[in-house]
Amino acid sequence: MTRRFSFALLLLACPAMVLAADDPPPNIVLIYADDLGYGDVSCYGGRVATPNIDRLATQGLRHLDAHCSAATCTPSRYTLLTGSYAFRQKGTGIQPGDANLIIRPGSATLPSLLRDAGYDTAVVGKWHLGLGDGPIDWNGRVAPGPEAVGFDYHFLVPATGDRVPCVYVEENRVVDLDPADPITVRYGRPVGDEPTGVSHPERLKMKPSHGHADAIVNGISRIGFMTGGESARWIDEDMADVLSAKAVGFIERQREAPFFLFFSTHDIHVPRVPHSRFAGSTGRGPRGDAIAQLDWCVGQVVEALERAGLADSTLLIVSSDNGAVLDDGYVDQANELLGDHRPSGGLRGGKYSKFEGGTRVPTVVRWPGRVPPGSESGALVGQVDWAASLVSLAGGEVPPGALPDSRDQLPALLGDEAVGRPHLVEQAGGLSLRQGRWKFVPPGQSRERLGPWRSHKFDPPGALFDLQTDPGEQHNVAADHPDRVEQMRALLKRLRST
Ligand code: NG6
Ligand code: CA
């Protein structure tokens, strides 16, 4: 089906739409925050002001039951880009910074299918899906990378802000590397006798609380060891500026083709070291300040779209890769300065958790003239479906067998349809299952505090929660509904194996 034809069909199917049938498909900008919890932005009740994200919600749609696919980064991102559940594929857990690319080069992905549909595609920011296909030479060409899975342009934080190498990679090369000072990266044991968080704690401006005691870069000890590359090392305080400028630059370079920008921010992941413009600005410590900084990044993109006259022709989505966490490895007073801010917005658990706080994330969708301003949706929406939905929006083709777990749920994503998925698998160590108002958590442990950790253990047959009456998952009603528990257990088993 051609792009124009399928888009015209969509127009017929959606009476709310006011665009003309021959309008081209929109640009797509996905701003993907890191570790942003359901209650972390002010339009979801957060106590840190996020005026730019709130404005998008006022101009568009706020999802109340939208989920990333896993309660940690790598599996969520893998699922988002491949339309394939990460739990089906070994080696898709949280990756070290020297991991190889975990998406098969040349496979059909969200970006590759958008590219096939005529989109110019870019990823700017956190990658965390591995690079290369053997020992990585950080001083040479670092490939395969995003270009092998559908992105025309990339500017990356290769893994995470707290993992070496602490350098940017653009177009398969470390940025600003001096060949006379080559980089060596190693996980597990030091490369040489470089200072670490353990050997030189006096050099640290932010101390680790657990892990994160290896190489010191910019006064912060990380996970993993690296030597060399002094001129290429990033400065954490500048990262939001650097990444936003690259995202804005990509938008400003656009001429004819529609484009897809995956702007994958570092904020609000650890280490939380915002620019001095934001440090101390919220009174809630570095975590609050990182939220303010993230919101500023969103504003930069919105302004760039407006300047380029592209705001009306762009579908803009803001969401997150997993739920909230407080202490995630550094002493940054995330707990102490929380005040009345509730990062998971009253949901139980957060990052790493099988409870709703693990995967239910803020999700704001703006598309002027198409998505009604100030609207809200309670549809069950999963990021696993965004690949098929956005490719469909673009008028692209999904080849047989591609994006195997992704369904075209565009009407739910855009707020035209109120129910969404019939069921949704949530991944966090193990799997849990949503079905309408019900949530089933199989027997076993689930983390429930946002750090310091506490786990809750459910004995067989597991836990059942009625989210309609108990959104905070406090009352296990499994004993009252044995048939439903059995049906959901069997459904989860089937979904896991098919
Ligand atoms: C954990 C790290 C945590 C964070 C997480 C990945 C320790 C003790 N904890 O292993 O700090 O980096 O991995 O976060 O090292 S994610 O958002 O990329 O999934
Ligand atoms: Ca994350």
Image (cartoon, helix red, strand yellow):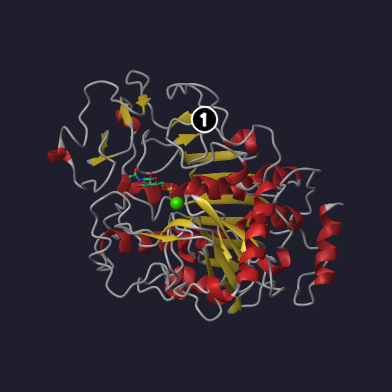
Task: Determine whether, in the image, residue 33 is placed left or right of residue 201.
Answer: right
Residue 310 can be seen, yes or no:
no
Q: Residue furthest bottom?
A: 469
Instruction: Check disc 1: other Cα within 10 Å, few if <14, some if 14-19, many if 20+.
Output: many
Residue pictured at 23% horizontal, 65% vertical: 336
Q: Is residue 252 above or below residue 176?
A: below
Q: Going by the image, does 87 lie left or right of 334?
A: right
Report the residue marked by disc 1. Answer: 100
Q: Quadrant location of residue 49?
A: bottom left
Which residue: 30% across, 54% down? 275
**Does residue 160 appear to the left or right of 281 in the view shown?**
right
Q: Can residue 286 be seen in the rendering of this structure?
A: yes
Mark 1 residue type? Asn
From this view, report whether residue 159 is shown above or below residue 420: above
Height in image: 20 above or below 254? below
In this view of the protein, which residue sits in the foreground, 350 or 377? Answer: 350
Along the viewing direction, whichever of 342 and 126 lies nearer the viewer: 342
The part of the image, by quadrant, that contains residue 337 is: bottom left
- The picture places residue 379, in percent across and down from the top left corner, at 64, 72
Residue 55 vertical position relative to residue 142 in the rendered view, above or below: below
In the image, is the residue at mark 1 within 8 Å of ligand 1 by its beta carbon? no
Q: Position of residue 58 (x, y in %)?
A: 54, 77
Give the residue at x 76% y 56%. 392
Residue 31, given in percent of the width and then of the height, sits at 53, 56
Q: Secondary structure at mark 1?
A: loop
Whole-percent x, y for residue 480 in the image: 56, 76
